[in-house]
Structure formats: C-alpha cells, structure tokens
Image: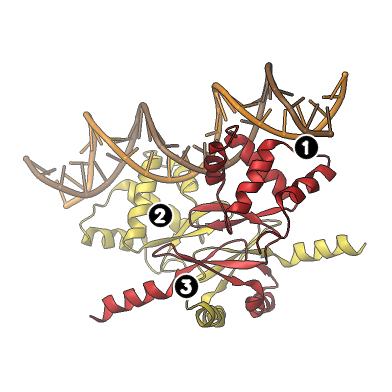
Chain colours: A red, B yellow, C brown, D orange
Amino acid sequence: MASASSADEVLEHLRILGCRMTPQRRAIVTEIMASDGHISPTEIAERVSDQVPGVNASTVYRTLYLLEDVGVLSHVHLESGPEYQFQSEAPHVHLECATCGSEDSMPLEELLRVREVILAARDFTPDLTHFAISGTCSSCHRANSRHKTR
Amino acid sequence: MASASSADEVLEHLRILGCRMTPQRRAIVTEIMASDGHISPTEIAERVSDQVPGVNASTVYRTLYLLEDVGVLSHVHLESGPEYQFQSEAPHVHLECATCGSEDSMPLEELLRVREVILAARDFTPDLTHFAISGTCSSCHRANSRHKTR
DNA sequence: GTCGTTGCAAAGCGTTTGCAACTAT
DNA sequence: ATAGTTGCAAACGCTTTGCAACGAC
C-alpha cells in the first residue's frame, strides 16, 4: 500500500506545522499519490497543470521542498534525475537497467548484510535508497550473452 | 596509480580510431589525469580555460562524450551531478556522506557478495560503480549520536 | 585539400528567486 | 488584517546544437 496516509492526512500534517492547505498543494499531493512509486518534478508540473488552476512549476518545486523538509517525501536519484516518493512507503532500493531503462526494486531488509559489510569495511553507514543501483536486467543480460556467443 | 596510461597513450588510442590529436584534447586529458579520482565537466572547463587557448565548454562536453564512447572514461553520479574518471582505474564504489559531503571509496572486490545477493534475489547484475552510495560517515555518525543522547 | 574539430552564439532544460498580488485562516 | 502562498517573469547553471572558420593529417 503506497498510501498509508491519504492526501488529507498529509495536508493535516502540514496544517499542524502552521502551513496552509491550498488547492495547489492538494493537487500536487494527490498527483504524487496517483503515481505509483516515484515521479519527477516536471511530470508533476505537467500533470497537475492539466487540472483546474494550472499550477506553476515554481509552486511544484517549493511544495516538494517543503514536503521533503517535513518528512512526508523523499527523493531518489535515477539516471534521468531526481524523483520524489512518499517517505511512508517501505524502504526499498531501486534497480535500474542501464540498457533498457527498466526498473525493479528490493526491500531494504534483503540488503541488511550489505550495510554490515560497508560499515565494517569503512565505518560508513550506507543509505542504499538514496541513489538507484545501476546494472543489467535479466532480459538484457540474456540478449547480450547471445550476441557474444554467436 | 591513477595513470596506467599517459595522456599521450590516450591520444594515441584516439588516433588509431581515426580521431585527431588537438591541443584542446591534450589539455582536457591532462586535466582529468591531474585531478585525482573524478572531476566534473564544469571544473574541467574552468581549469583548462586558464591554460593556453581557453577551451570552450562545448569542446569539453564533446570530448568527454567521445572519450567515454571509446572506453577511456566513465562517469559516476554523485549528489552534485556527474563526474568523469579514467576507466583504467581499479573499479570502486563511491561512498558519499549525505551530511558533510566527505567521500570515501571501496574496491569493488570487497562487495562481490552484494552482487551475488542482488543477482540471486532479482536476477539483476548490479554495477555498483555507476551511482555513488549515500550514507553517513563515521564522524558525522558520532556527532549525530552525541546530539541525541545529551 | 579533406574532413575532423573547434569556437561562438543561441537555445534547451530543469531549477531557483524576487516581488507584487492573492488568499487561507 | 496578517502572514503564508502563488504566479509571473527573469535569471541561473549545466548541457546541447547548428554553423562557419579552423587546422591536423
């Protein structure tokens, strides 16, 4: 479930912090929830612009900054740039195929050992969710092997 | 040793491919070798501009594209954007502290098990060198713990 | 002389900022 | 009425592109 919190709950969260609930913010939050997973600032701006008022891009950026600041959103770096997602989602790493661009993800729990390896080796506590992991998906790998062997 | 190949060797490599050796390319390659590790396109442009002809930024980008295309360079994604490095360097992952921006690296060999875990779990062959790994370095981690406990 | 390469200027794209108008409260 | 928000327009930083001049070979 991507939506542990509804759009209204998010906006309620903001109100408690002294922020105001505007139709623009409602539209932006709704759009991010509608996208499953993550979405880029540009996409949000485009999609929301189709809606009623025609939200300005600067408003989108200011809202994203605010929502990340209060802990509602976080951003990930993919090959195409930053993408925003709800913090409430289960932490996961993004696997992005460098060849075809397809995407998969893995729950962070399955990579606990990775954290330990890096912590032990460099005394560094990794956050594997912040950058994607690039690589080759299974179908591109197969396609590639075929070329090499024939 | 960052320089298994000298600037001349790189340019010789290009010549074989039918490319020409120009003073601009020589300056760019030299500058990347002078930087230890990686360097951004903007930094290259700035530093090389100080030199003789004042190499144009578009030339820098075109050269980087070419050198990556022929396998001499590769780029990594850090928080601040793409950075270029020599492909000949031993493969390593970049560890970037999200708090202080400090950087460390780990030879890829120390993370072979990570590859296996991800391959087994998702049939995805990761390239851990392409994106940095974000996280918290030891000193920021200590500083952070101190704040929490007092 | 050829053809690859460069500089220049312009444009593209994503993002940020100052400011006056607007509006949720 | 007040203070937070928005739209607009301009600016910004990085990167790309078209084209004529240049220069390595």
Local secondary structure at mark 1:
loop
In the picture shown, does residue C25 fall above or below A11?
above
Name the residue type under label 1: Arg
Q: Quadrant of residue C12?
A: top left
In the picture shown, does residue A35 fall above or below B123?
above
Q: Where residue A108 sits in the image (x, y, percent)?
A: 65, 72
Disc 3: CA contacts within 10 A as few (<14), some (14-19) or many (>=20): few
Q: Is residue A99 left or right of residue A22?
A: left
| Discs 1/3, front | 1
Image mark for residue B30: 2
Q: Which residue is mark 3?
A: B90
Q: Is residue C11 left or right of residue B104?
A: left
Mark 2 and mark 3: Cα distance apart in space: 19 Å
| Discs 1/2, front | 1
Q: Is residue B24 left or right of residue B38?
A: left
Q: Earlier in the sequence, mark 2 or mark 3?
A: 2
**Camera-side residue: A132 or B99?**
A132
Mark 1 and mark 2: Cα distance apart in space: 54 Å
Mark 1 and mark 3: Cα distance apart in space: 52 Å
Disc 2: CA contacts within 10 A as few (<14), some (14-19) or many (>=20): some
**Camera-side residue: C2 or A87?**
A87
Image mark for residue A20: 1
Q: Is residue B130 left or right of residue A121?
A: left
Mark 1 belongs to which subunit? A
Q: Where residue D19 sits in the image (x, y, percent)?
A: 23, 32
Tell me, yes or no, if residue A128 can be seen here: no
